[in-house]
Image: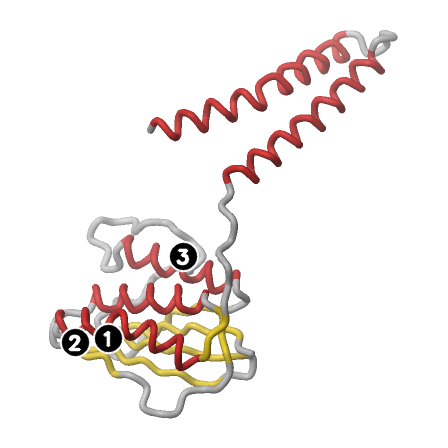
Amino acid sequence: MAVTSRVASMIGHLIGTPLNVIAGRAAMIRSNPNDETAVENARRIEEQVDRLAQQIRRLIEYLTAPDPAVESRSVAEMLEDALGLYRPLAERRGVRLNEPSAALPEGTIDSTALMVLTSLLSLSLRLTPAGGEVSIGVTQAETGVVFDLRVPAMHPTPQRLDRLDPPEHKTARVGADQLQVLSVCHAIARRAEGRLEAQALQPTGTLLRFSCKAS
């Protein structure tokens, strides 16, 4: 709360004075548009608009964290990093992780893929009860690599993944946590020129398909 109040105070201080000047000068022009001072008032408005734009740009730069460095790894290394984190958790929860049996695609993918994969694995294991299973497949695609996670215990999401709206009803089968994780992963994938889809499986469950570029 203290941090929020400080940021709000900073924003108010940075833009308050320019906005007051703009409003005052605009009112003067409106009240007497033919007055000889109208040109000077218009100049002052332009000056304050430029100042306001600079202040907002500096504020955005100050509050925006820099993007983390991106490194490239082989598909095999990236997948092993993700599975290495969650094999112990799957074993502890009594969930089977069916890992790829076929040879993995060649090429390298960047570290954003690891962020998406670990988030999807974490969500899948949380939603899968003891005795259940999560199957993982990796295939080569025309533009990169496709990771498929089959999660029979996950209810299909009823809405688009680019939205963060919570469930409309408390009794909704898909919880807010599932929607939020999938939406964030969707955004990360898109930023890296990839794609995340959630498709309903028959008779039950969800297929999470994550496509990413490879080189």
Circles 1 and 2 in contact, beta carbons < 8 Å: yes
Residue at numbered disc 2: 132
Residue at numbered disc 1: 152
Where's residue 160, x and y in %? 42, 60
**Of callouts 1 and 3, which one flags the residue occurring earlier in the amino acid sequence?**
1
Amino acid identity at mark 2: Gly
C-alpha gap between disc 1 and disc 2: 8 Å
Q: What element carries label 2?
A: loop
Where's residue 177, x and y in %? 28, 55
Where's residue 24, x and y in %? 68, 11
Q: In which quarter of the image is residue 76?
A: bottom left
For mark 3, does the 10 Å Cα neighbourhood hold few (<14), some (14 to 19), or many (20 or more) residues?
some
Left or right side of 171 for 20: right
Q: Quadrant of residue 94?
A: bottom left
- Placement of the N terminus among the 4 image quadrants: top left
Please identify, in this view, whether the residue under mark 1 or under mark 3 is nearer the observer: 3
| Residue pictured at 36% horizontal, 92% vertical | 102
Q: Residue 184 carries which label?
A: 3
| Residue pictured at 39% horizontal, 78% vertical | 77
Circles 3 and 2 in contact, beta carbons < 8 Å: no
**Of callouts 3 and 2, which one flags the residue occurring earlier in the amino acid sequence?**
2
